[in-house]
Image: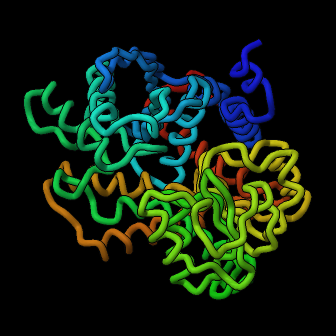
Amino acid sequence: MSAKAQKNNNEDNVLKSTLDLIRQAVDFLSLSPDVYEHLSVPARFVEVAVPVEMDDGTMKVFTGYRSQHNNVLGPFKGGIRYHPDAHADEVKALSVLMTLKCSLVGVPFGGGKGAIVCDPYSMSKREKEKMSRSYIQAMGNILGPEKDIPAPDVATDAQVMAWMADEYSTIMREPSFGVVTGKPIAVGGCVGREEATGRGVVCVAKEAARTLGIPFKGARVVIQGAGNVGGIAALLAAEEGCKIVGLSDVSTGIKDAAGLDVEKIMAFVRQGKLLKELDGVEKISNEELLALDCDILIPAALENVLTSKTAGNVKAKIVVEAANGPTTPEGDHILKENGVFVVPDILANSGGVTVSYFEWVQNNYGFRWDLATVNRRLEEKMVEAFTQVYSFYCEKCYGSDMRTGAFMYSIQRLAEAMQYRGWLTSDK
């Protein structure tokens, strides 16, 4: 059995655990079995060859994926990640989560996700540009502002989106920058998009703390991940008066019970340096970071970090899932048994797709909002979503957990749309 096959049989199979939660929610809501059937498989899954001429003149062919899960609410929407461990089931699972996320936060998109299996950190800028354009050449016929709208994800950014938008526009023989979101401002991007996911995470963390009667100002916060989401969340939480007592990146974790100097640390990280190179701080492992004494833990890296081995060590009162799928079902059960309040990923990290929606609207109508308007509307959306999910959880599934409540709330909205569109054959 291959290592990848073994991985997919372990507790970290995000696709299986996501589908199990969907089935459970459909059963709890007494919905038609058709709802699960529609949500259990992508409407389309595409695997393509992505040929790239490398700087040394050799040709290398990468594998590219795009999962278009469900478009009952509108065009497919979801990021593209560049990662050496990306695989089909992961991409499918993330597209499912995006469908649920869009439904939950009330934006008119369906779920999509893409990936290229590669090591982007070993590639030159020219090689990444060629790879990005090659991916669009292979996928262009299934993308479009009214079909499927990619966005940045792990190891992709505004520059990658600009290359993709340009390549798509070349194929279409007309400017069509609305095919992606998360673009640079100069080519139709939205102010505040880069910070949107991290800002949304802080919004719901504040609401969760208020709900549990924990003062947000002065709260001790640990964040796993110092990238675009975790780093922004650290800076914004510190601005709100939180004490960031732990932070990590791929190289190491760092801690300080008195509070880290987040601005200084993030300025260091933005120079392209790793935390292991930072002097004057105490270094710990990422596993030790998850066990630090704190009020709020924010996993903002990759999936499957709170597992049967690590969840029992969590001392936080609140876990806010900034990453996609950071908690396995076994980890979830342990956190629930220990009384940890979990804000699930489909709610916590929905700020990115919310501002992507704002960008798409602005591209379609040819106008722009200022930063204050974007941030205000984002906060309104996040607070509204948290309030609705928490109310649904209290009324319909109290004694379960917020993840169950979020899934049920989202799927109920999807089922209603399916019913109106005539997708359901059963009257149940």
Camera sees residue 420: no
In which quadrant of the rendered image does the C terminus lie? top right
Residue at position x 48%, y 39% from top? 417
Camera sees residue 239: yes
What x and y, as percent, mark residue 62? 43, 20
As drawn, which residue projects farthest toward the left? 174
What x and y, as percent, mark residue 420? 46, 36
In which quadrant of the rendered image does the N terminus lie? top right
Q: In this view, does 365 lie above or below 289?
A: above
Residue 106 vs residue 344, the one in the foreground: 344
What x and y, as percent, mark residue 170? 13, 29
What x and y, as percent, mark residue 215? 69, 86
Task: Locate residue 282 relative to residue 293 in the image: left or right.
Answer: left
Residue at position x 61%, y 25% from top? 89
Residue at position x 68%, y 36% from top? 18
Tell me how the rendering is colored.
rainbow
Residue 169 vs residue 209, the one in the foreground: 169
